[in-house]
Image: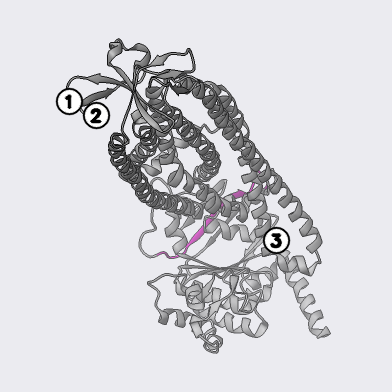
Amino acid sequence: MSMQEEKVLHSVKDRDLLKRLLRYAAPHWKTITLCIVFAFLIVIADLARPFLIKVAIDDHINGIYKPLVEVAETGQSADLRLGERSFQTAEEGEPSTTEVQAAQRKQIVQVNGTHYLVDGWLPQSAGSLTIRSDGRLTHDEGGVVYEAQPIPSEQIAELRKGSFQSMLELGFWFLLTVAGSSLLSYRQSNLLQYTGQDIIYRIRKQVFDHVSKLSMSFFDRNPVGRLVVRVTHDTESLNQLYSQVVVNLIKDIIVLLGIVFVMFQLSVKLTLLSFTVLPVLVLLTFWYKAVIREAQRIARVLLSKLNAFLAENLSGIRITQLFIREEKQWEQFRDLNESYYKAGMRGTVINSIFQPAIGFVGNAAVALLLWYGGIKVIDGAITFGIVYAFTHYIRQFFNPLMSLAEKYNQIQMAMVGAERVFELLEEKPAISDPEKPISPAGRVLGEIVFDSVWFAYEGENWVLRDVSFRIAPGQTAAFVGATGAGKSSIIQLINRFYDIQKGKITLDGVDIRDIPIDELRSVVGMIQQDVFLFTGDIASNIRLRRGDISDEEVEAAARMVHMHDFVEKLPQGYRTELGERGVTLSLGQRQLLSFARAIVFRPSILILDEATSNIDTETEQIVQEALAEISRNRTTLIVAHRLSTIQHADQIIVLHKGAVQEYGTHHQLLAQKGYYHRLFELQYKEERAVSKEA
């Protein structure tokens, strides 16, 4: 698989991912519980509002027109009074089922602007009332005649006065539910955002900490852009899960259960009718689940590839411009960008189908309700307030379903992000601390021994073959050989950036695999040909933000490598900010800074990997003098192509095709007339030819 390709995960189960995700939320269980309580109260407030409107319509706006039962007592049990007469409101359904005497049945009606108290209960089916000349009322349907007594407008006004007071109270409670719900929602949102951000902060910190401890082999096969997406975009996708989805998902479920309960209390038939559309909803949900997860996963993989390409292309922008490759790079970017665009649009189209489909199903339920409920209101089986409340509850029922659809999309995004984040966290470092670590006794002397070392970066493509040598404490050893001979690999192995497959490497007699990695690398200072500088000032790049290294020590290290003079000439001296990767410094100045960085950490072993290749001849002479000073009583390893820079070495190890060809001092190797001698003669002739041309 290409380095730019990324494996797509399919085998991870959602419940396993959710278990791991919920573990991160466990420290915030009190806050989450409080938010769930808030959600419960918000739901109660939301469900109360349509019910309050129903009460206002049935009991107050149309309350005086309800069927009544005249009662003898005039105490608190009376719901309504007209003069000396007292009445109770008949319960819903009672007009068709009550067994009260006909003489007790009364109802207030309005005809031509005048209110009448009618003997009996009128049907609510289609038809109108007509006032006869004898003062009685006739209902058009069936021609039934009712005895009626006109009610003075003063008494109606008195009745309405009570309704006005009740409507004011209902309005107060309605406003209270709105205000309470808003305040609780505000507080809940703040708590959830805090919780989500804190969890994501910890996850991102864990991911970065884990990535920083992974071995070089991991970074060899994973481009930077991919890792950036994991640490930023994938972890951020989890934020919505914690700050929006978890608690609000519970809230939506409570809303659904609450609505179902209230609807069944109001009317079983209307509830069952409203839910006839649920099979369609289930089919839509299964379809959505089948397609959106894969769409999100593919989009995230393509985003990683796009970021990896951008990171690589922007890092190598000078090469792109130097070789006039802008058009070709643009074509690659266009293809990747188009693929990502299509993947994103696929998810967008799926959502644009699903959410309106949910809305359509909800409106279909409302249409059924208006048709059937309207008929039942006309027939008198149910009140208008119930139908009105049902229309609200149906919309409230489908709003959480649409919200659940959106949350399901967020959940799928979070699941895809979780897959990728947890895959990264499960990556085991190829290099790890030993179970029973051994620290070198006392001060590290710097004896390095390679004993029959075999090493390959991949499989059995051996880079080093049966390499053995010994570097005594305080010695300066140089490694020479053609490109690919294995010189830099030896340096990487001493730092344990990679582990060997066969043999043993020891430091002061201790196998380096038994030494804690931090301890091993703390005694090894390395200066490479390609110097990496961080964004920041010169001083922070020398001390690498270590607080225990003083400004005086930084300046002393800079003086030792003859860097202090040019730093002092800069506008802000050691506080001068460097550009990205130190582009404001010349190659030679960057190299000097890396020397100062290595020196200030006082390593027991100093490694120079082509460290003077970017320094001019005059500066190299100065650095060589500094190196002679700092390498005294310190084991020093030098990798160099220019043999003139290593003639002073106590031991020169010549490598050829991954094996030790010969070793000895400069003069000993020349006397042997072997491989080293041929390299020296070749370089000498080249340097002499160059000097003649100059």
Question: Mark 1 highlights which residue?
Answer: 74
Q: Is residue 654 left or right of residue 74?
A: right
The answer to whether residue 664 is seen in the rendering is yes
Foreground: 74 or 34? 74
Q: Name the disc covering residue 81, or none.
A: 2
User: Colour scheme of this structure image?
Assistant: one colour
CB atoms at circles 2 and 1 under 8 Å apart? Answer: yes
Give, as a three-letter code, the residue at label 2: Arg
- Mark 3–mark 1 Cα distance, whole angstroms, equals 91 Å
CB atoms at circles 3 and 1 under 8 Å apart? Answer: no
Magenta segment range? 444-461
Task: Give the structural element (helix, strand or loop) at label 3.
Answer: helix
* Quarter placement of the C terminus: bottom right
Task: Give the structural element (helix, strand or loop) at label 2.
Answer: strand
Q: Is residue 224 left or right of residue 373?
A: right
Q: Quadrant of residue 489?
A: bottom right
Give, as a three-letter code, the residue at label 1: Thr
- Mark 2–mark 3 Cα distance, whole angstroms, equals 87 Å
**Residue at coordinates 39% horizontally, 48% vertically from top-left?**
192
Q: Name the disc covering residue 313, or none.
A: 3
Look at the image and say whether residue 450 sits in the magenta stretch. yes
Q: Earlier in the sequence, mark 2 or mark 3?
A: 2
